[in-house]
């Protein structure tokens, strides 16, 4: 609970008020049965004056308890909502520091559930804690003591009630607790399957996989339902058992006190007070049990949030002043394994790139082209060897300097909901219309943006579904070049463009970004044929380096790729 308490401290004043009002509520609840007993005794004695004064006193205490309850709810909600919001923001902030490896370790679906469902569980337990933390022990001890004082002859009924309710509570919650971890894991799984299905709905529809997807989802959903039903069944059995025990205790008390009433009618007032205290004892135990149940479930959620907060980012950056880096790139004996893989994706790769060069990277599928590209903006660190930018080891470069120097345009163009201008400003936060015009002109996006009524303020819908694949790639390239980076990496990011548009983009890159080091990852030889140099990868190794003409003459791997594609290029 330490992780929660650290955030509760921020709301110290609200917490103190909430706890103080709880004490007032409990004292009011304990006082009322005693006053009711005195009122009943005054009625029996036909003492009108005392009856009226005690009645007003009773009403006043009840109103005070009601007001305290209202304020308790208000301030408890403020603390619970504030703490949950702070934890959610802190967890999201921590996630932003994660590398790709960290995200893969948790999975995106699980992180979403932790930020939503798990934090809601924490919020609920904070709320009930502030409403019941002091209430349970004070209510239990106070009701127990006052019941014993009111009718000491029935002490054994009180003990039987307490023991019975405690046993029922412990048996019920011991069974519930083990299901909560399973439930949270299944919620993760349901979220993952739903997300996969909705994001891949076109594939599902294209291959008529609706029934199979329904089977996959239904299996996990049924498991989740089963465990929730088990918890619900235990809870639904527990409450009637509580009521049965309480009613038996009341019936027993009435039976054994009936003889006393014949001799002293005022005992009726004590009996009413005694039964009220019995109910309060039982309620204290029930509320305590509820709190135990919610705490048990919240403990699982707190553990899951703690895993996020204590996770060590796989990549950390040095602090220090901003560094001015040029466009040089060097790989020195770089080997890279993805987490959990024994076979390296890159093996002992070494090369150097001068500022302003245009470099192509080609190879068969799985050769390691994209992995090599991801090491330059330090999305991953090499397992062995060194990657340098501007002559400096990336491990010694601060994050702001690296992001300013290197721009990475992915093959899968990802745009965020909002407007075109908001997406472009992710590449340069203070970009004006002139900057946007220049960037979109280079990426050949200007032609379709001009046709939009709102132009740069045109909306980008969820998953940019209102743009075609080629339009998304051109906007993504625009975002990559708008900040005028020293190094621009295009990871097959023109694959959705037609030959004419691709040619215009490359021509604009050469003319307008002459001082920028450009690294083009490509499947097609035609995309890099005019590059200053081409790097050839095969099974994670660098097997060739040179111009197109040199590689066709001297490199078997490159020649094979070229010969395979040459016929297709001629047909096109």
Image: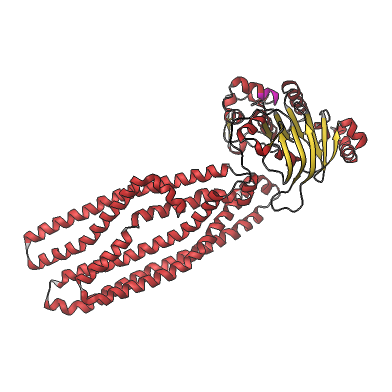
Does the magenta segment cover residue 440?
Answer: yes
How far across and how far down the image is residue 343, in percent? 77, 52
Q: Residue drawn 67% across and 36% down? A: 413
Residue drawn at (87%, 38%) of the image = 558
Q: Is residue 446 visible?
A: no
Majority SS type along the magenta span: helix
Front in this rendered view, residue 414 or 285: 285
Give the farthest residue toward the top.
434
> Residue 231's x, y, as percent?
47, 64
Q: What coloring was used for the rendering? A: secondary structure
Task: From the viewer's perspective, tell me whether residue 195 is left or right of residue 569.
Answer: left
Who is closer to the viewer here, 89 or 33? 89
Residue 201 is situated, as x and y percent measured from the top left of the image, at: 64, 46
Instruction: Give, as a single range, the part of the protein colored magenta.
Output: 439-443
- Specify whether residue 504 is painted magenta: no
The quarter in which the C terminus is drawn is top right
355, above or below 251, in the image:
above
Q: Quadrant of residue 247?
A: bottom left
32 to 167, vertically: above or below: above
| Residue drawn at x 70%, y 24% as measured from the top left | 442
305, 209: nearer the viewer: 305
């Amino acid at each position: 609970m330490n992780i929660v308490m650290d955030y509760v401290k921020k709301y110290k004043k609200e917490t103190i008020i909430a706890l103080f009002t709880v004490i007032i509520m409990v004292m009011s609840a304990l006082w009322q049965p005693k006053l009711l007993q005195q009122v009943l005794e005054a009625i029996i004695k036909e003492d009108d004056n005392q009856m009226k004064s005690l009645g007003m006193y009773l009403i006043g205490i009840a109103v005070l308890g009601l007001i305290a309850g209202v304020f308790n709810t208000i301030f408890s909600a403020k603390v619970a909502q504030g703490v949950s919001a702070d934890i959610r923001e802190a967890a999201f902030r921590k996630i932003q520091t994660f590398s790709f490896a960290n995200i893969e370790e948790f999975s995106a679906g699980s992180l979403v559930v932790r930020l939503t469902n798990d934090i809601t569980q924490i919020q609920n337990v904070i709320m009930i804690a502030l409403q019941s933390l002091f209430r349970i022990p004070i209510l239990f001890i106070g009701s127990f003591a006052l019941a014993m004082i009111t009718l000491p002859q029935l002490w054994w009924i009180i003990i039987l009630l307490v023991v019975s309710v405690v046993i029922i509570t412990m048996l019920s919650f011991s069974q519930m607790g083990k299901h909560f971890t399973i439930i949270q894991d299944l919620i993760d799984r349901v979220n993952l399957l739903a997300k996969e299905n909705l994001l891949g709905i076109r594939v599902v529809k294209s291959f008529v996989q609706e029934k199979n997807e329904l089977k996959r989802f239904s299996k996990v959903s049924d498991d989740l339902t089963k465990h929730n039903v088990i918890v619900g069944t235990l809870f639904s059995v527990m409450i009637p058992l509580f009521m049965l025990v309480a009613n038996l205790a009341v019936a027993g008390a009435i039976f054994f006190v009936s003889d006393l009433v014949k001799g002293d009618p005022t005992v009726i007032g004590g009996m009413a007070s005694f039964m009220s205290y019995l109910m309060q004892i039982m309620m204290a135990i029930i509320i305590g049990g509820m709190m135990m149940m919610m705490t048990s479930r919240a403990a699982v959620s707190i553990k899951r949030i703690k895993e996020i907060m204590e996770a060590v980012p796989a990549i950390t950056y040095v602090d220090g002043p901003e560094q001015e880096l040029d466009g040089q790139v060097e790989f020195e004996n770089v080997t890279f394994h993805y987490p959990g893989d024994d076979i390296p994706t890159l093996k002992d790769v070494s090369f150097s790139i001068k500022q302003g060069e245009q470099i192509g990277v080609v190879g068969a599928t799985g050769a390691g082209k994209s992995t090599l590209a991801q090491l330059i903006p330090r999305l991953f660190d090499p397992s062995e060897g060194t990657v340098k930018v501007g002559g400096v080891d990336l491990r010694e470069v601060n994050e702001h300097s690296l992001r300013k120097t290197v721009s990475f345009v992915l093959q899968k163009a990802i745009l965020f909901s909002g407007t075109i201008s908001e997406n472009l400003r992710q590449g340069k936060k203070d970009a004006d219309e002139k900057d946007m015009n220049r960037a979109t002109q280079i990426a050949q996006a200007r032609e379709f943006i001009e046709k939009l009524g709102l132009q740069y303020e045109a909306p980008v819908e969820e998953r940019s579904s209102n743009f075609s694949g080629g339009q998304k790639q051109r906007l993504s390239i625009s975002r990559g070049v708008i900040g005028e980076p020293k190094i621009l990496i295009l990871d097959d990011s023109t694959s959705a463009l037609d030959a004419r548009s691709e040619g215009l983009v490359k021509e604009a890159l050469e003319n307008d970004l002459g001082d920028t080091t450009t690294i083009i990852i490509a499947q097609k030889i035609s995309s890099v044929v005019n590059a200053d140099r081409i790097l050839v990868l095969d099974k994670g190794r660098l097997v060739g380096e040179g111009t197109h003409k040199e590689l066709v003459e001297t490199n078997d791997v490159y020649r094979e790729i070229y010969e395979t594609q040459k016929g297709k290029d001629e047909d096109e």
